[in-house]
Image: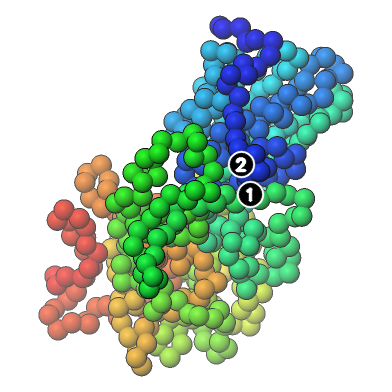
Amino acid sequence: MAQAPKQPDTRRVFRVAPNTQLAKFLLSDRPVDVICGPLGSGKTQAMCARVMRHIQQQRVSKLTGRRMSRWAIVRNTYTEVKTTTMKTWREIVPEEIYGPITGNPPPTHRLRFGDVDAEVIFMGLDREVDLHRLRSMEFTGLAWNELAFIPKILFDEGMGRLRWPGPDHGGSEWHGMIADTNAPDEDHWLAIMTGMVPMPANLTDEERREYVWPDFWGFYKQPPAVLEVRDGAGMFTGYKVNPDAENLANLRAEYYPETWHAKKKSWIDSRLRNEIALVVDGSPVWPQFSIDAHVSHIPLRPIPGHTVVVGLDFGRQPAAVFMQEINNRVMVQYELLGFNEGAVTFAPRVSQFIATHYDGYAVDYYGDPKGQDKGQADERTAYDIFNANGMAVRPPPGLKHNMIATRVEAVTSLLTSMYDGRPRFCLSPLCRTLKLAMAGRYHLEREEDGELTPKKDKFSHVCDSLQYACLGLGEGQRMVGQTALGAMKPIKVYAGRKSMRRISA
């Protein structure tokens, strides 16, 4: 193994221009700092360099006589940790200088030079073992790569892990968390906390306190990498590189002009202009959905005298959607999402939500039929657990074999039908995740057999809940008989790409 020098190789030091957001982030000692910037802005390199700076500024241990620290560098998937995060780390902290990264899993870089003795662990949070480690270990610092893909519950959990080294070593000069990210989605907690989008109107006072960015935390928003070019009449004509963009000296002159070509405006806004935008990777499941047509301009509130219908998706990423049918229009009022929690935890949350927002209302619950299957840990089903919490869940009527096409078409039927000159489907702006999902984040991906099916992720769970609720309202039965051409049933059609439309049997 190559021996590390007594002092870091200064030829490899990461250099940034002074008085930039990148420099302010790199030199800060705040306990929490997040830098948000476009592609190519140097933010991940700065994060890795800052880890190295904090490693060297730790107090000398009273027990070992060395500067002890333990770090976790975290990304949302283990694959991306290995292919992107660790690659950047190696550029800042080369193995030929500091020794090899060992261990698999998790990959760990043990740094010993001068009086430094530091441990840097790389984690991908798509694996149960890494989630367990994050929640059981103690760290000096946590570095979150691409924070836009990290749930708030994990970020909050990280704050409680910052207590190593302890008093027996003499404590630590610095404990904290740092992160880099591209512009997040508008429903992401970071966008809400930093004021990039307005605070949701349906939050309680207690919930609002959870989304207040403390004064002693830092948020550094880098300038856009590219600017829109407009003519004298204000019409858009193209893009140009922003001369005030950061890290330009470390990029090829052609980097951004080559990057923005053949890209959607939403992608450019999010990845290059550092603005909140909806970036869709595939074909939307519901191309009929329109934010202008289907999303209310004001929050939708419960209307007395009308039954509340709740759609439920179970599993470790549960979701609930709450709606009422009023004057033949479906009003989707609220959403409730869970992360890495089962029915035992989620059911009381749903019950409390009902008590808070729908006290005294009649409520019908419709859930994923798989929720009738017994769990591995005990003999109770998700349906049993919800029933024990006072919520009698039923499978949606008319749903055979949990067919995705039937579920998708129930929503499509609402999106494409009108009543009294208005769309029958109306979504509250409070349902941020569902809005983004329906606008395209809930999209089709190609499976190994070549078929296109909805991608399973955080957006699919809330959409599944919506589907069960719509079927619970009877939308499945309404679809049957809408045409005189004969009995209609939703089936999957594949001819190069899959259609979810109805065809005659």
- 224 on left or right of 447: right
Residue 267, position as x, y percentages in the image: 40, 54
Residue drawn at point x = 44 percent, y = 31 percent: 83
CB of mark 2 within 8 Å of CB of mark 1? Answer: yes
Q: Is residue 154 above or below residue 461?
A: above
Q: Is residue 179 left or right of residue 80?
A: right
Quarter placement of the C terminus: bottom left
Whether residue 86 is visible: no
- Residue 92 placement: quadrant: top right
Q: Give the structural element (helix, strand or loop) at label 1.
A: strand
Question: Which sits earlier in the primary sequence, circle 2 or circle 1?
Answer: 2
What residue is disc 2 on?
22
Identified by mark 1, the residue type is Tyr
- In-front residue for pair 216/364: 216
Residue under label 1, please give it: 220
Q: Position of residue 24 (x, y in %)?
A: 68, 42
